[in-house]
Image (cartoon, helix red, strand yellow):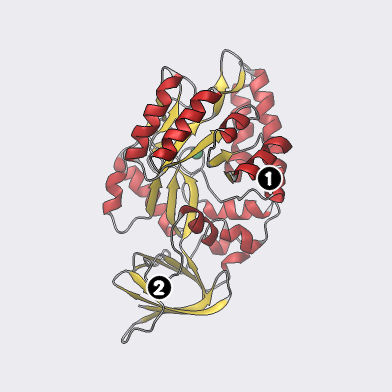
Amino acid sequence: MHVRGVGLPDETPTELWIVDGRISTEPVAGADTVFDGGWIIPGLVDAHCHVGLGNGGEIPLEEAVAQAETERDVGALLLRDCGSPTDTRSLDDRDDLPRIIRAGKHLARPKRYAAGFSRELEDEWQLPDAVAEEARRGDGWIKLVGDWIDRGVGDLAPLWSDDVLKAAIETAHAHGARVTAHVFSEDALPGLINAGIDCIEHGTGLTDDTIALMVERGTVLVPTLVNIVENFPGIADAAAAKYPAYAAHMRDLHARGPSRIAAARDAGVPIYAGSDAGTMVAPGRIADEVEALKGIGMSPAEALGAACWDARRWLGRPALDHGASADLLCYAQDPRSGPAVLRDPDLVILRGRAFRPQA
Ligand SMILES: [Zn+2]
């Protein structure tokens, strides 16, 4: 196959040939031109989603396959799975599904995360060993639940003490894995960042001090803005009668979260796009997250990069490079123009195989 158009982010005329599933930047005789005129970008990245997670936790593998197919059809060809109770490793044998970088199972404490989602550790000092096991099973990431409602306290509270986090994150790094954590609130952030965590998910409770700490430590942020904006009020409403302080805290984080995430960007914290698809957010929403990132001050190109070339570099995956797997998208209209275009690529090429989502 042969495709020709304007390559992003450089806006340079681009011609690519696809041979044996790989990109060639050098001409290949006899290639069939399948796209000509328009825009060409590397496959999108959803840097926070959950393939294999449903409302009650584990789901049948066919449902996980359907989640992955939906992501492929909107152009998300590289998924960072931020924790799944379903073992989806067999999906790696399917060459029609997006590539998945797994974080294994969420690591939490009993009753300190959504029921059925996580591996629950009775004693917090079991965390380093659990991290080592998940690191062996995953694809280079570990997912911790950093804070959740503590029903005894009636508010969000950290799950782990600082010494446990230091030992656990050290163990992950010794196994070659990076660590990220679900964090809504303020209090869990200093312990996690000081322990050397690589990434924070959500980050609605970031303060000027913890933003400065992230800059100092080189910590990355994946905010999942769509989930915050759409779902925090409902979470607060559902809990308000029994846990009013928690509900008020969630409403406050909803009100202030986007401006705190904008402050993190202004301070220089690297931010990538994650939809949080899997439970409250349906699969296939990465284009909406890109749009939401414009709302915290990103330019259209920067927001797209956070779900594409920049996210690929962060995750150590190639873009439109000679010899790379042919995972790319072709658009007749400029994909920076908005979610209606971005979610509807004219041609999806995954491992050198063409998919036309509308056909
Ligand atoms: Zn999530």
- The image quadrant of residue 126 is top left
Residue 23 higher or lower than 156, as above or below: below
Q: Is residue 2 left or right of residue 221?
A: left
Position of residue 190 measured from the top left corner of the image (x, y, whole percent)? 62, 31
The residue at 60%/42% (across/down) is 217
Position of residue 112 measured from the top left corner of the image (x, y, whole percent)? 49, 22
**Residue position for label 2:** 322
Q: Quadrant of the N terminus?
A: bottom left
Judged from the image, the secondary structure of the residue bearing numbered disc 2 is loop
Q: Is residue 146 left or right of residue 265?
A: left
Q: Quadrant of the C terminus?
A: bottom left
Position of residue 302 measured from the top left corner of the image (x, y, whole percent)? 63, 60
The label shown at residue 329 is: none
Dot 1 or dot 2, earlier in sequence? 1
**Residue position for label 1:** 264
Q: Label 1 vs label 2: CA separation?
A: 35 Å
- Relative depth, front residue between 78 and 178: 178
- Relative depth, front residue between 354 and 320: 320
Q: Are marks 1 and 2 in contact (CB under 8 Å)?
A: no
